[in-house]
Image: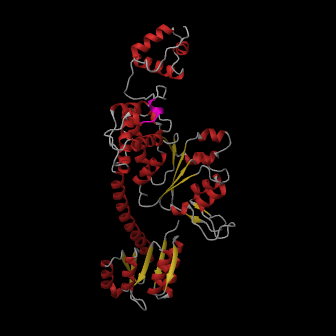
Amino acid sequence: MARSVLLVDDDPSVLRVLRRYFEREGWETFQALSGEDGVRTYEAHVPDLVMLDVNLPGISGLHVLEVLIARGATVVMLTGQAEVGVAVDAMRAGAEGFLTKPVDLDHLGAAAERAVEKVELRRANHTLAERVVDQGRAGTLGTSPRMRELSRQVELLAASRDTTLLLQGESGTGKSWVAQLTHGLSPRARSPFVEINCAGLSATFLDSELFGHEKGAFTDAREMKRGLFEVADRGTLFLDEIGDLSADLQPKLLRVLETRTFRRLGGTRELQVDVRLIAATNKDLAAEVRAGRFREDLFYRLSVFPLTIPPLRERSREDVLELIHEALRQLHLRHPVSPDRLSDRAIELMLAYAWPGNVRELRNVLERALVLSPGAEIVGPEHLPEALRAPGAPRAQRLDSTVLTLEEVERQHIERVLYLSEGNRTLAAQRLAISRATLHAKIKEYGLAQVGREDEATP
C-alpha cells in the first residue's frame, strides 16, 4: 500500500509541483493551504509524512509544527533560502529535516524516505524492546540438534524480508508462534503482524476480511472497509489453515502474491501493498493438489520455503522439558497461588506422553493442574488428567539420546496390552502369544500387579 503525505503550503503552484511528484512516485497525497486546514487534514487522515511550509497565513509554520509533533506526526519543513536559521530551530522542535525552495525534486524523494524510515526505526527499537520484556526469553524453539537447525532456518528466513513461508505440521505444534517469531526477527518487525484462520469462514466473508470492500459492495456494506492486506501493509500477514481456503479465493490470493496488487470487493481501483505472507496448514497440500481441491500454481507459489514443525512426540525429552518449564513459568503468572514446580513423577509422565494435541494440549494440561492445586507445594501426578496417568496412555517414541533396554520395552508393551485388555490376564496372554503363567511371572517381575487382575479363565 502506498505511503501518504500531507502537503501544507499557501502557494498553489508549489502544491501542484509537489503533488505531481509524490503521486508519480506512488504516494497518496493530501493538501492544505493554511496551518489550520493542515491540522484538520492531518487529524482526518493521519498521513505517514507532512511537508510543511514555514511561512503560512494565520498561525505560523513553527506553531503548526508543534501541534503536529504533539500528535505524533513526521514533519519535513519547506523553507526559503533566507530561513535556514528558522529551519534549524524547527529541527530542534522535532522536524525530521528541511528542504529549501525552490525544491530540488532529485532530493525530495530521498528526504521524504529518510524522514519516514528514521521514525520507523525508532518505533522498531521500541517494539523490539517491549517484545523482549514481554516474552522474557530469546524465542528459541528447542535445544536438540533438530530444533536448533529449525531455529537457524527461521532466523535465515526472517532476515529475508519478502520470502513467502509455508509452515506445515499437526494442529497445536506452534505454527502461529513460529510465524510471530519470524516476523519479530525480521526487518518488518516495526510493522503489523496480522493473523486470520481460513477454516470455517465462507468465501464471501473471507474475501471481505482479506481484501476489504467498498461502500455498497453488498447489502450490508454501509461504509468502506480496509482488508487485512491493507492493515498488514509493510508487515506480515499470517494465513492459518491455508488448506481450507475457498477455491474461489485461491486465484485472487495468487494474484496478490505475484503482483502485490488487488481490488477491494466492489472496487475498481488497484491497491498496492508490501506484505510478507506466511501460510500454515496441517493438511498435505500436495495431496490436496492431486485431489483437485487446491491450485497447483498457488501451492508452488506458497511453498517457496516450506518448514515442518515436528509434533511433540518426535521432539527430544530436552525440548519437551524446556516447553514444560516455559509454559509453567508463563501460566504461574496467571495462577500465583498455585505451585511453580512439578514433582519428578509428574514430569516423567508428561515426558512419556505422546501429546496428540501437541503444545496446545500441553499448556491446557498444565493450566488445569495449576487450577486443581492452589496452596499445594508441588504439582503431582494426582493433578494431571487420567489420560496421562493411565497405563495405556499414548507414549512418545522420541528420536533422542534416550535408549530403552529390551526389558524396559517389554515392560511398557505388557503394560499397554494389559490396559487394552482391561486387566484381563487371560486375554492379555492370548494377545501377547504367551502362556498365562509366563504373563503372571512377567507381571510380578515388572511390578504390574495393579494393572492386571486375576480371572477364572484358564490359560
Q: Which of 326 and 193 is in front in this view?
A: 326
Of 263 and 159, nearer the camera is: 263
Q: Is residue 17 left or right of residue 209?
A: left
Q: Residue at x 47, y 33 (%)?
A: 386
Q: Residue at x 31, y 40 (%)?
A: 377
In the image, taking residue 25 as reference, residue 94 lies left or right, namely left
Magenta stretch, residue numbers:
384-389
Residue sitting nearer the eye, 441 or 407: 441
**Please, is residue 113 above or below residue 343 in the view?**
below
* Helix, strand or loop: magenta stretch: helix
Residue 409 pos. (x, y %): 43, 19
In the current view of this chain or complex, which residue is farthest to the bottom?
58
x then y, percent, for residue 189: 41, 57
Q: Is 21 on the left-hand or right-hand side of 367?
A: right
Rendered position, 228 above or below 452 = below
Q: Residue at x 32, y 85 (%)?
A: 86
Q: Position of residue 296 (x, y in %)?
A: 63, 45
The residue positioned 43% from the left and 29% from the top of the image is 398
Farthest front residue in view: 456
Examine the rendered structure and indicate whether residue 323 appears above or below residue 123: above
Left or right of 316 in this view: 394: right
- Residue 95 drawn in magenta: no
Count of marks overlaid on the render = 0
Out of 104 and 376, give the one closest to the viewer: 376
x then y, percent, for residue 330: 37, 48
Which of the colour schemes (rainbow, by chain, secondary structure, one colour) is used?
secondary structure
